[in-house]
Image (cartoon, rainbow, N blue to C red):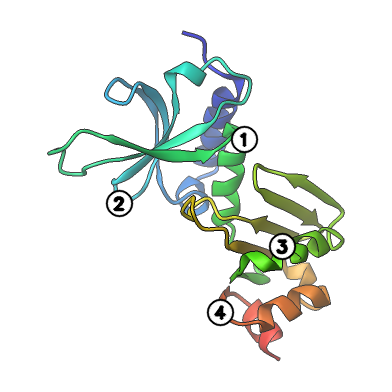
Amino acid sequence: MSLSPSVHEWAAFAADLHQAGIFDRVIGDRFTLGWDASIEAVTLLTLIEGDVCWGVPREHLSGEDPPVDNWLLDPANRRPPRWWRRHTPTTSQFALQHLIEGLHPAGGGFTVNLPPSSAEIVERLRSIGQTSIDLGGQVLIEDDDLVILAGKSLWTPDEETDITVQVEIGASRIDSIPQPLIDLAHRGGGMYHGAFIERARS
């Protein structure tokens, strides 16, 4: 059985985090890399609560950057695992998504949900960063000490089209947050953390 280079990269990335002693802080869930015959997949990670796992199905294992699916688990092992949904179109996006969700930079950040009619905001956000890349329905925007992930959340049900914007800000940017991000935070309904709270609400 061939194993995708992206799965190898995920294993190496996780090993680096473990060696640095920060895997639990950065990822937060359980590293469960291995073959699972009950779901016919190589598992990559299991939710800390033990009721969801992520894995690459057997039929995609030899791909360059294969998709990652979700399975629902019964922590008490009374029921067999059940396939839930396609989580990300690539293993690389899976790794990036978990890394970004685990970021808690000194500058803080926020997450806000917007209606589908706000799609043009995502395009405006691209101008804030030095680079941007499309990740299967989401846009990753980067600048010095600034990361923005915008688009349909991986946890949003397929029938819904709301947009989620997640912003993480490093310490060096706390006094120079781009105005569009402050305006976005002022729209309300978001979750805030770190020093950004006071800056955004001032």
How far apart marks 4 and 2 lie (CA) works out to 27 Å
Residue 121 visible to the viewer: yes
Q: Position of residue 189 (x, y in %)?
A: 56, 79
Which quarter of the figure is the C terminus placed in?
bottom right
- The residue nearer to you, when weighing 81 against 118, is 118
Please state if 109 lies on the left or on the right of 101 as rendered: right
Disc 1: which residue = 92
The local secondary structure at tag 1 comes to helix
Residue 2 vs 132, above or below: the answer is above
Residue type beneath disc 2: Glu
Residue type beneath disc 1: Ser
How far apart marks 3 and 4 lie (CA) works out to 17 Å
Mark 4 closeness class: few <14, some 14–19, many ≥20 residues within 10 Å:
few
How far apart marks 1 and 4 lie (CA) works out to 30 Å
Of badges 1 and 4, nearer the viewer stands: 4
Disc 2: which residue = 49
Q: Earlier in the sequence, mark 1 or mark 3?
A: 1
Q: Which mark is residue 189?
A: 4
Disc 3: which residue = 119
The local secondary structure at tag 2 comes to loop
Marks 1 & 3, CB-CB < 8 Å contact: no
Toward which corner of the image does residue 76 lie, by quadrant? top left
Q: Earlier in the sequence, mark 3 or mark 4?
A: 3
Residue 76 vs 63, above or below: the answer is below
Residue shown at 75% from the left, 61% from the top: 122
